Amino acid sequence: MDGRMFGLETPLMVALQHLLDVPDGDAGAGGDKASGAAAGGGPTRTYVRDARAMAATPADVKELPGAYAFVVDMPGLGTGDIKVQVEDERVLVISGERRREEREDAKYLRMERRMGKFMRKFVLPDNADMDKISAVCRDGVLTVTVEKLPPPEPKKPKTIEVKVA
């Protein structure tokens, strides 16, 4: 569907539309390259896959008095399907995969629920305590809580004794 039908012609929307419309066969003719660009100059397959996964995973981020809370809807997923990690010391990554239930005797008449990989990345602020991160999934809602470091003590001025010569 073209975004112009709904008046969504902003540069950001055009760029997102371009990224999401790249067929798997055209995404990075050179395959997965660490350099970030494919041989044809377009995005790599990994970049397109990650961009799709991130665009399809909405999240709420809340700042509380003593912590940051990241809330993501994960209906129907178990704890084994969700992974919460910290990369590069300050990047919180929430990822996983929702697999389709396959049955031999069933035929889908309509498939509307999103299946496949999902991922979100968040750069954590400097006052986030990297040793106090917890994740709880309740009623299909994942809440990752990152505690804040206590505020630094104000530095007291150093008093220097003046000697009389």
Image (cartoon, helix red, strand yellow):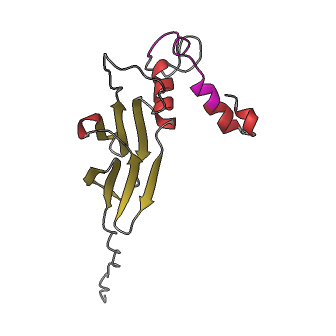
Q: Can residue 9 be seen in this view?
A: no
Please state, as top left, top right, bottom left or bottom right, where the C terminus lies in the image: bottom left
Q: Where is residue 70 in the image (x, y as percent from the top left)?
A: 39, 52
Q: Which residue is drawn at 36% across and 40% down?
A: 93
Q: Nearer the viewer, residue 113 or 122?
A: 113
Horizontal relation, residue 117 to residue 22: left or right = left
Q: Which of 138 and 84 is in front in this view?
A: 138
Q: Which of 71 and 138 is in front in this view?
A: 138
Q: In which quarter of the image is residue 79?
A: top left
Q: Is residue 27 magenta?
A: yes
Q: Which residue is drawn at 59% across and 16% down?
A: 41
Q: Is residue 98 above or below residue 128?
A: above
Q: Which of 156 and 49 is in front in this view?
A: 49
Which residue is at the far front?
105
Q: Can residue 5 be seen in this view?
A: yes
Which residue is at the far bottom?
164
Please state, as top left, top right, bottom left or bottom right, where the N terminus lies in the image: top right
Q: Is residue 156 above or below residue 79?
A: below
Q: What stretch is highlighted in magenta?
A: 17-32
Q: Is residue 118 above or below residue 40?
A: below
Q: Residue at x 29, y 86 (%)?
A: 163
Horizontal relation, residue 125 to residue 89: left or right = right
Q: In which quarter of the image is residue 105?
A: top left
Q: Where is residue 84 in the image (x, y as percent from the top left)?
A: 30, 42
Q: Where is residue 107 in the image (x, y as percent from the top left)?
A: 40, 19
Q: Position of residue 52 (x, y in %)?
A: 50, 30
